[in-house]
Image (spheres, rainbow, N blue to C red):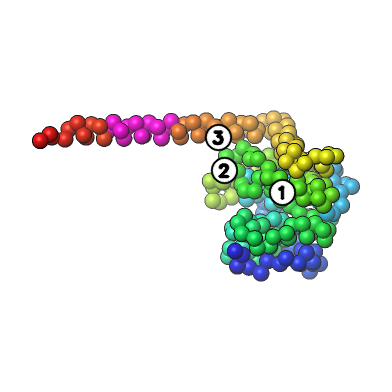
Amino acid sequence: MTKTPASDNPSHYRSKIRSGVRFIAQDVLLKSTVWTLCKVEVHGRELLDNVEAPFIVIANHSSHFDAPLILGALPHRLSRHVATGAAADYFFDKKLKGMTTSLFFNAYPIERRGRSHRGITGRLLDAGVPLLIFPEGTRSRTGAMGPFKPGVAGLSISRDVPCIPMALVGAFTAWPYTRSTPPTNHPTIHVVIGHPMTALPGEVATAYAERMRGTIAELYNTTARAYGMPTLDDFARNAAIKRAEDRAAAAAAEEEGLRAMTADQAEEPTT
């Protein structure tokens, strides 16, 4: 349950006053910080020349850098009113955290459990507010891309709005899930923008979501190979190896424990 005054009123996310304050927060503070910590290269911005709100930005999600990278890469005419879906139980569980998230990202709460704020995503699109949503639903723990939930695809179909696919290449390496602080080695991150997508005639949400995922994977892998960086396949392979090693280590530990227990029982005196 959210503990901050998160608004369900779409006009709240299009406020000119909030937009002006957010411009300072995003461009002057947040973007300058991220662009200083990292070397950011943006590809494909010209593909957005004819895009108008409302739309949904979708991307792979593997780092705390992800939302700042996307908002900083978008032209200001498109980013100024983008509302970012944020997990209510994490980003809105404390007042200060919720206010900060709202200020920097024009965030609205998405309930991962419960029914509060239900339907706000659709109401925002109906009011012309563009959205940023990560279809995986959570940050990757391994760098590999998880399955896309069909909810975003369903919104795109039902509201007849395009999705803008974006691949964030190098963000996981720069600031992985296991690291609590930002990088200090000035890593390179590529933000790759793809052609806006809409559902094909008769395409259902699950198929559309899978096509979204495939599009972002192609953007990611093509760029990663071009710049000699790990691909999503590399991350998936490494994760599979790590899981296998963990299972083998657990099995070995269990076997050693059984041997020790057997040895102890054998040494016990009989009466």
How far from the left and from the top, in percent, is residue 190? 71, 41
Residue at label 3?
Answer: 239
Q: Disc 1 residue type? A: Gly
Q: Distance between the residues labelled 1 and 3?
A: 26 Å
Q: Foreground mark, 1 or 3?
A: 1
Q: Which residue lies furthest to the right in this view?
A: 50
How far from the left and from the top, in percent, is residue 5? 66, 69
Residue at label 2?
Answer: 141
Q: Is 59 colored magenta in this rendering?
A: no
Q: Residues within 10 Å of mark 2 (few under 14, many from 20)?
A: some
How far from the left and from the top, in percent, is residue 34? 67, 51
Location of the C terminus by quadrant is top left
Q: Which of 269 and 243 is in front in this view?
A: 269
Q: Disc 3 residue type? A: Ala
Q: What stretch is highlighted in magenta?
A: 248-260
Give the structural element (helix, strand or loop) at label 2.
loop
Give the numbered dot on residue 151. 1
Marked residue nearer the N-terminal end (2 or 1): 2
Callout 2 touching callout 3 (CB < 8 Å): no
In the figure, 116 relative to 191: above or below?
A: below
Q: How far apart are marks 2 and 3 (CA)?
A: 9 Å
Location of the N terminus by quadrant is bottom right
Give the structural element (helix, strand or loop) at label 1.
helix
Relative placement, left or right, of 202 versus 37 is right
Q: Which of 65 and 30 is in front in this view?
A: 65
How far from the left and from the top, in percent, is residue 137? 64, 48
Residue drawn 60% across the image and 43% down it: 140
Residue drawn 79% across the image and 45% down it: 164
